[in-house]
Amino acid sequence: MADKKADKKGLRLDLYKKRMKENRKKVMVTSPLLPDFEEFQELLKEIWESKWVTNNGQFHQQLEKALCDYLGVENLSLFTNGTLPLITALQAMHITGEVITTPYSFVATTHALWWNGIKPVFVDIDTLNCGIDPDKIEAAITPRTTAIMPVHCYGNPCDTDRIQAIADKYGLKVIYDAAHCFGVKVNGESILNHGDMSTMSFHATKVFNTAEGGALIVKDAETKKRVDYLKNFGFAGETEVVAPGINSKMDEIRSALGLLNLKQVDEAIEKRHQVAMKYRDALRSVKGIRFFDDMPEIRHNYSYFPIFVNAEAYGMTRDELYFKMKEKNVFGRRYFYPLISTFSTYKGLPSAAPENLPVATRIANEVICLPMHHGLSEEDIDRVLEQVVR
Ligand code: T4K
């Protein structure tokens, strides 16, 4: 009898210790997809033996081709991150004056305009997808407007048809910041084929990563040639410089990492999908929490799982929930709070006034992106939900 009691106590202690260990373990908002280390070493060995480590090497060329095939695009140029393709796209198309954009994104989107001496004009967003609201674009167009730079936020496609119709009516270019869109398709077609150009980020925190990296997707081979010059200081040959380019070439090590990650990205997206379904099942009945369901005819990539907290209905503010999660080592992120339009560089712009951006202002105060990645365990998911479900 005494033995049995001791066993039971021991079991409870083990469970308690397991729980404590789990609670101490951090559940991060994301975690990078990494290939098998030995497979990566094999490719590194090839790089070491070839002594060709950057400047359009064999892995760079292979990755550009493999990404075109995977993503369903014709012309893709690799970059060192997702910010320089934005800056380069604007250079390549000689965009000047004013560009209409969203305040609800990562700062890089607007910084790319600023680095080109372009004035950002912020337009409010739509709650349906957190992308720029097409109904509000025309009112922001002035004689100085030359382009629209929307973001497919969280990988949710913008209303590309309506944006294109407005661009055509006013003779504007469209550059999509598609940093979140790896593998996203609409009616079986890549989202990256919309607009004049699209940009991607392959940062460690993205669905597909090369540690740091990115790409610019363009319409034709001639434009890709120009972009390739621009990312290589403007060199068109050993001694000829045709434009004031920058250095943004992806090296062989990152390209090799990308080639290996590409082989496992579908499996990673499926794992993300499973996480999304579990979150949705558990959150559907929680009052005051809104989230996105799959949209018709879209192949999603589940890059982020944003929830929007209505403080009154939920009985707790977004920040109260965010810090409560943090205390339990569950690390969501408030992407995208604060709005770009509130940062010191931009807040003086007339379009940055909160009255001009009521939806974005509200959403930025409601959002928490829950942990979402391929490596989340059942226990991790339960720990996230324990914090949010009430
Ligand atoms: N346009 C849009 C719409 C974007 O969202 C972004 C970038 C860009 C353009 C520009 O692309 P890049 O030039 O960055 O390629 C992160 C990323 O740095 C940034 O790429 C991303 N968007 C943005 C939304 O999020 P932080 O400051 O939140 O990252 P950080 O370092 O806090 O990492 C978040 C979590 O990820 C960590 O808490 C843990 C995990 N993590 C992170 C890293 C770097 C890892 O587990 N391992 C890692 O190596 O900005």
Image (spheres, rainbow, N blue to C red):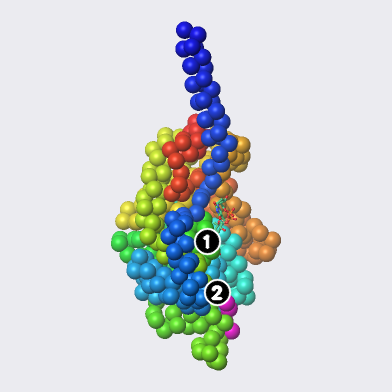
The residue lying toward the viewer, choosing from 370 and 147, is 370
Q: Can the viewer see residue 52?
A: yes
The image position of residue 74, as x and y in percent, is: 36, 74
Visible residue check, residue 208: no
| Horizontal and vertical percent position of residue 327 | 61, 37
Q: Main secondary structure of the magenta part?
A: loop
Q: Measure the alpha-carbon separation of dots 1 and 2.
A: 15 Å
Q: Nearer the viewer, residue 138 or 67?
A: 67
User: Which secondary structure lies at badge 1?
Assistant: loop
Q: Is residue 247 magenta?
A: yes
Name the element at disc 2.
Answer: loop
**Vertical relation: 51 (above or below) 8:** below
Badge 2 amino acid: Ser
Q: Residue at x 48, y 80 (%)?
A: 228
Q: Nearer the viewer, mark 1 or mark 2?
A: 1
Residue 296: horizontal and vertical position, in percent?
A: 32, 53
Residue nearest the viewer, comparing 227 with 177? 227
Query: How many residues crowd mark 2 within 10 Å: few (<14), some (14–19), many (20+)?
Result: many
Q: Which residues are magenta?
A: 244-250
Identify the amino acid type marked 1.
Answer: Ala
Q: Residues within 10 Å of mark 1 (few under 14, many from 20)?
A: many
312 or 261, which is in the foreground? 261
The residue at the point 56 percent across, 89 percent down is 241
Label 1 CB-ligand 1 distance < 8 A: yes
What residue is shown with label 2?
248
Q: Are marks 1 and 2 in contact (CB under 8 Å)?
A: no
Of pointers 1 and 2, the one earlier in the residue sequence: 1
Q: Is residue 382 above or below residue 4?
A: below
Picture residue at 50% right of the left edge, 45% below the top: 371
Q: Which mark is residue 211?
A: 1
Ligand 1 occupies quarter: bottom right
Residue at the location (36% across, 50% down)? Answer: 270
